[in-house]
Image: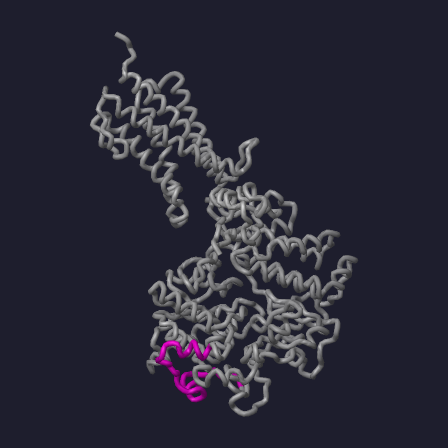
């Protein structure tokens, strides 16, 4: 059961978290509570204003890639000026990662903050079209909430650019930028080759700015309180706060807004304050992320500088702690079977490599592994990396390699026919129903 | 009176270059089918199939040009130059010469779009290239309706032979394409193949990506 | 001015003509797809590189100026 909780104590109102989610509870904000808390939409009127503020704030994308927002906006502005075409702005709420729920939660609880950010980016980019892209297959009826929010804003004429709501298919690749554009254009949600970049030529050939919905929520607040305010939390090189999906060993799922740079161990501690035993592992960054041994995790903080030292990334802020009765290899194999089935099947290396890696891991995890299986998996992981049109094979390979390293002792056990997992029930969430036909991608 | 004069020589040249053009076009079609299925010619590297396909198509057009020019230059019958590319522009034997013009028009379009392929959208290049499947039968019809001597003897054997191999080739290509998997089914197919190694045949089928 | 090879993996079908014509920069993986060396093209290989680009039946291989 996903609950949004705020674990930070209230300091002075400027630095206290949460910034994005409603305080003290799960009541979704409607237009009135939203404007009562944050004030009205501060249109900037002066071109270049918002870019400057976003640059000073150092805001990076919260969809996983952490690309500097001001840089992407500038790229779109340059392309628009050069090609004399009005840009399109897309709010990407298709978080697609089964283990992540922060975007769905944000859209459910604070849709107006996202919609404010969308309007501000549209104004800054000179866009004449704005789209909010989201999944409908989640627990809550986000579509209905968004339609309500759009209607509330229409009643007070809050928006200058009409927002189109668009539904994303339940595919892992749905949130990938070029796949998103492909779907909005009426086709399947499968990636296209870059170049050209979508900031140059995207939807209908227009320069297209795609930003994660959480990123836009931060934009809406930076526009109100300024870049200095944004930088009051976080680290110097990675400022601000972010939403995290924390899945604990007891099955609880929490969406929490935390400052970047926060120690991992305080994020993953169990309710009774116990930290993870040294033989445990933590999954950082979701299914394209990295398995990290608990001992290493206790020294790390939630920022790319710290995590980069062990080859991990913050990604979309997903932290999963499987319970001790689960086998890390079994969990990994199940996820990789899912990731393989979610391949678009367009690129030879990904199409050929991912199913084979999945089969190899299945053999390692639950079958009778042959001597060369692990070597095969490692070779295939190397063969697929960087050879697709998108980063699906790369991310999958990273996830697989980190499992083979972190669970090396478990691999040895499996090679001898043993397994330390006593509970065969899958812990990491995997959606039912794989894609079988073209319709599943539309 | 000697049977050999300019007109006769030109007439023979036109017949001969026409036959060679048809043979070359047949070879070009077969090589094109081979390219789409990644087939190989024994003793030759893979790139040679594509290379031969392209080069022979250029040589074929040269022979068609010679065939057309000698027919027009032959004053025995009056065929205007425009009839080479404008169907039904010839007052003489309007229909079968018109067929020849249609085939030549398509061939020119295929070759020109291929030469500037880099500057065209993939969809446009492909659509025009598919017209080649129309160009060959039209050329064949042109050849068998063009003269009586094609309808018996060696030339008949040649014409029928060309038709048989092209029909067989296209049939083979269509059958192979029918067993290709649509994009959305490929990875699921390969997944079950690698998880159940007994179905190696399915695995081979699933290994391939799209075909034009 | 250096040039770099780039393959569009969506258009690539694994015909293999590129690897035959430019083995110095392109090798095949175990599934028949090209592994392209993305480093700047060494002097002397420009002609072969252009041949490889031209030979690709799907025009998946490109030579980019950088």
Q: On screen, B11 above or below A389?
A: above
Figure quadrant of the C terminus of chain A: bottom left
Magenta-colored span: A25-54
Residue A401 shows up from this direction? yes
Whether residue A139 is visible to the viewer of this picture, yes or no, is: no
The quadrant holding residue A83 is bottom left
The residue sitting at the bottom extreme is A12
Residue B197 on image: x %, y %: 65, 47
Q: Is residue A34 magenta?
A: yes
Residue A396 percent across, percent down from the top left: 60, 61
Q: Is residue A411 above or below residue A226?
A: above
Q: In which image quadrant can residue B106 be found?
A: top left
Whole-percent x, y for residue A378 in the image: 67, 56
Instruction: Name the residue nearer the viewer: B205 or B120.
Output: B120
Residue occupying the far left of the picture: B91
Residue A277 horizontal side relative to residue A117, left or right: right
Q: Quadrant of residue A9?
A: bottom right
Q: Foreground residue, B118 or A192?
A: B118
Q: Is residue B195 above or below residue B18?
A: below
Asked whether, in this view, residue A5 is left or right of residue B130, the answer is right
Is A202 magenta? The answer is no
The residue sitting at the right extreme is A416
């Amino acid at each position: 059961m996903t609950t949004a909780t705020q674990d930070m104590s209230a300091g002075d109102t400027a630095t206290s978290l949460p910034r994005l989610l409603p305080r003290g509870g799960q009541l979704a904000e409607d237009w009135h509570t939203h404007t009562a808390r944050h004030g009205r939409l501060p249109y900037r009127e002066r071109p270049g204003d918002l870019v400057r503020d976003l640059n000073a704030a150092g805001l990076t994308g919260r969809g996983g890639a952490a690309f500097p927002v001001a840089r992407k906006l500038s790229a779109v502005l340059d392309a628009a000026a050069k090609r004399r075409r009005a840009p399109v702005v897309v709010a990407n709420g298709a978080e697609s990662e089964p283990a992540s729920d922060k975007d769905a939660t944000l859209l459910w609880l604070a849709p107006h903050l996202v919609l404010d950010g969308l309007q501000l980016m549209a104004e800054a980019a000179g866009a004449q079209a704005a789209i909010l892209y989201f999944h409908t297959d989640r627990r809550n009826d986000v579509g209905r909430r968004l339609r309500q929010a759009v209607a509330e804003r229409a009643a007070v004429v809050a928006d200058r650019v009409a927002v189109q709501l668009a539904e994303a298919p339940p595919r892992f690749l749905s949130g990938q930028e070029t796949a998103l554009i492909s779907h909005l254009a009426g086709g399947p949600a499968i990636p296209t080759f870059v170049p050209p970049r979508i900031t140059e030529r995207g939807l209908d050939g227009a320069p297209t700015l795609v930003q994660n919905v959480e990123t836009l929520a931060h934009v809406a607040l930076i526009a109100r309180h300024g870049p200095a305010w944004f930088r009051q939390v976080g680290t110097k090189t990675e400022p601000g706060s972010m939403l995290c999906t924390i899945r604990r060993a007891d099955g609880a799922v929490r969406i929490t807004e935390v400052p970047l740079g926060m120690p991992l161990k305080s994020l993953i501690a169990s309710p009774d304050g116990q930290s993870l035993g040294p033989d445990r592992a933590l999954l950082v960054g979701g299914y394209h992320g990295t398995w990290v041994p608990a001992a290493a995790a206790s020294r790390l903080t939630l920022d790319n500088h710290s995590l980069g030292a062990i080859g991990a990334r913050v990604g979309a802020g997903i932290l999963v702690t499987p319970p001790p009765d689960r086998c890390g290899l079994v969990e990994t194999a199940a996820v990789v079977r899912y990731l393989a089935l979610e391949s678009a099947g367009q690129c030879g290396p990904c199409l050929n490599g991912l199913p084979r890696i999945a089969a190899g891991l299945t053999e390692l995890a639950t079958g009778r592994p042959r001597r060369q299986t692990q070597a095969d998996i490692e070779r295939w992981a190397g063969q697929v990396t960087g050879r697709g049109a998108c980063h699906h094979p790369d991310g999958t390979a990273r996830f697989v390699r980190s499992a083979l390293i972190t669970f090396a002792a478990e691999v040895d056990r499996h090679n001898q026919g043993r397994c330390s997992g006593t509970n065969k029930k899958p812990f990491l969430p995997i959606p039912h129903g794989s894609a079988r036909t073209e319709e599943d991608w539309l | 009176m000697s049977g050999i004069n300019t007109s006769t020589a030109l007439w023979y040249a036109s017949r001969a270059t026409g036959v060679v053009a048809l043979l070359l076009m047949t070879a070009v079609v077969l090589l094109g089918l081979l390219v789409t299925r990644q087939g190989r010619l024994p003793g030759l590297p893979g790139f040679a199939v594509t290379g031969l396909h392209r080069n022979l198509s250029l040589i074929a057009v040269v022979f068609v040009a010679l065939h057309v020019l000698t027919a027009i230059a032959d004053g025995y019958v009056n065929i205007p130059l425009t009839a080479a590319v404008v169907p039904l522009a010839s007052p003489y034997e309007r229909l079968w010469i018109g067929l020849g013009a249609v085939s030549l028009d398509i061939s020119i379009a295929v070759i020109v779009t291929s030469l500037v392929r880099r500057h065209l959208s993939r969809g446009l290049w492909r659509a025009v290239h598919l017209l080649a499947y129309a160009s060959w039968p039209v050329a064949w019809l042109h050849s068998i309706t063009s003269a009586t001597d094609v309808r018996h003897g060696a030339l008949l054997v040649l014409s029928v032979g060309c038709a048989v191999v092209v029909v067989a080739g296209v049939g083979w290509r269509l059958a192979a394409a029918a067993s290709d998997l649509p994009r959305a089914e490929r990875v699921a197919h390969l997944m079950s193949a690698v998880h159940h190694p007994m179905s190696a045949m399915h695995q081979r089928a699933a290994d391939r990506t799209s075909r034009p | 001015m250096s040039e770099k090879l780039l393959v569009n993996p969506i258009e690539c079908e694994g015909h293999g003509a590129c690897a035959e014509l430019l083995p110095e920069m392109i090798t095949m993986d175990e599934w028949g797809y090209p592994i392209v060396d993305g480093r700047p093209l060494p002097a002397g290989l420009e002609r072969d590189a252009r041949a490889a680009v031209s030979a690709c039946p799907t025009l998946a291989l490109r030579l980019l100026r950088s």
